[in-house]
Image: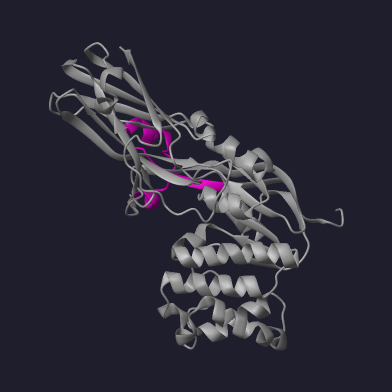
Amino acid sequence: MPADTIITVENLSKRYLLGHQVRDDTLRDRMARGMRSAASWMRPGARGTRRTVEEFWALKNLSFELQRGQVLGIVGRNGAGKSTLLKILSRITEPTTGRIRMRGRVASLLEVGTGFHPELTGRENVYLNGAILGMNRAEISRKFDEIVAFSEIERFLDTQVKHYSSGMYVRLAFAIAAHLEPEILIVDEVLAVGDAQFQKKCLSKVSEVTRTDGRTVLFVSHNSAALQSICTVGLWLSQGQLAGQGPISECLAAYLHTGSQRADFQAPTTDKPHITSVRVDPRSLSEGRIQVEVGFRSPFPLSPPVVGITVSSKFGYPIAGSNGRMAGEAWKPQPTRAGVVTAHLDHVPLHSDTYLLSVYLGDASMDYDQKLDVVEFDFVSPRFHPQMPPLQVIGQADFGWRWSLKSD
C-alpha cells in the first residue's frame, strides 16, 4: 500500500439472502411435500406456503484506490450499491468477499441519528463520538466550542437528542464529524435533510478540511452541482459493479448521459388526444441543449399537433418554456393522429442542478392533455458557477426552440 494511498478496496462483494413466501395450495404440491410433519401443517400461517431464499449481490468484485486528500464522489441510481459500500467502509456491515485496507480514523454520516445515543444530551454525545474516534476528553474539549458554534444548536445542547428534529441531528452530527479530525470522512445523502444554507456551509467545510488538513472524503449525493463543487474524483456504480471512475466531471458526464430519462403513459379512459411518452435525450445535455421527444395519439387529426414544454427547477420555479404556437409560420406540419414531436432547446439558461420537465399537448386552438413534472433530469455545466442565482425566465427571448415531427 503506497504511502499516499489511504483506502484500498480489492474485489469487494456483498451478498444478501432474500426470503420469499411461495404458495403450495394444490394437491400435487401437498403430496410432493408430504414428508412435512402434521404439526407443521397445523401451525397458523404455515399451511399452503413455503419459504424460498434468493441471493442478491449488492456489490460484486469492486476494486479501487483513494489517495490522501482526495474527495471521492460516488454516483449511481437507487439500488446501485452506494450505501452498501459506505456501510462496509464504516465497518457497520461485513463484506461477503474481498479485502479493504484503510489508514486512519473514520467518521461517518450515513443515516439521521446514526452514532448518537438517544437518551444522552447533545453535549454528552459530542464526548461519546469523540471517544469512539479514539480521542481523550482534553482533545474533545479543545474542539467543543467550534462544534457547538458550527452546529448552531447551542440552545438545545443539554436536551436529550431523542427530542431533536432530523435537521438538528444532521447539524450536530456533521459538526462533530468535521471538527474531531478523522483522517477519513464518509458522508451519505444525509446532508439533504438540512436546510439549503446549512448544506452550503457543510460543503464549504468539506472543501476546507481537504484543502488545509489533507483529509480524505467519500461523498454520496444525487445533487450533481454539489458533487462537482467539492469532489476531485468520481466512482460510478451500476447494479453493484464498477461502471466507471476518473475525474469527477468525466464520471458525472458518463453517468448522466447513459440511458434516457423517460416516462410512458397509458391511454386515458376517455377518447381524447393524449401524450403517450416523454423522453429527454441525455446526450444533448452536455452542451447546454435539451432534446425532448413527446409521443402522442389522437382519435382525430391534430391540425397541427402542438406540444408545449416547460423546464422548472427542482423546487418548481419555472426556468424556460415554449410551444409550437409560439413558432408561428415555422411550425406548420401536416395534420396527423399519432407521432413523435421532437423539441430542440438551444441556449437554455441552466446551471448544474436537477430540473423538472412538464409537457402539454394540443392543436392550433386548444390544449387536450398535460403531464406535470413527469421527467427529472440532471444537468452538469462545463463551466460550473456555484454562486449563480436561480433563474426564472419564461419565453424565447434568450434561447432558441426548433421543432420536428415524425408521424406514425
Does the magenta portion include 19? yes
Side (left or right) of 58 relative to 302:
right
Q: Residue at image x 19%, y 16%?
A: 303
Q: How many marks?
A: 0
User: Residue 140 versus residue 386: which sits nearer the camera?
Assistant: 386
Q: Is residue 66 visible?
A: yes
Furthest-front residue in this view: 397
User: Residue 234 versus residue 29: which sits nearer the camera?
Assistant: 234
Examine the image and state in which quarter residue 235 appears. top right
Where is residue 12 drawn, in percent x and y?
Answer: 69, 47
Does the magenta portion include 385? no
Where is residue 370 drawn, in percent x and y?
Answer: 23, 34
Furthest-left residue in this view: 270
User: Residue 94 versus residue 143: which sits nearer the camera?
Assistant: 143
Q: Residue at image x 53%, y 69%?
A: 114
Q: Is residue 183 visible?
A: no
User: Residue 224 versus residue 26: which sits nearer the camera?
Assistant: 224
In the image, residue 123 above or below residue 391: below
Side (left or right) of 224 relative to 314:
right
Q: Residue at image x 55%, y 58%?
A: 188
Region of the chain picked out in magenta, as a range: 16-41
Where is residue 79 drawn, in percent x and y?
Answer: 51, 45
The colour mode here is: one colour
In the image, residue 45 above or below residue 161: above
Which quarter of the image is occupied by the C terminus? Answer: top left
Where is residue 362 drawn, in percent x and y?
Answer: 20, 26
In the image, residue 80 above or below residue 362: below
Q: Residue at image x 52%, y 82%?
A: 122
In the image, residue 71 above or below residue 239: below
Examine the image and state in which quarter residue 128 appears. bottom right
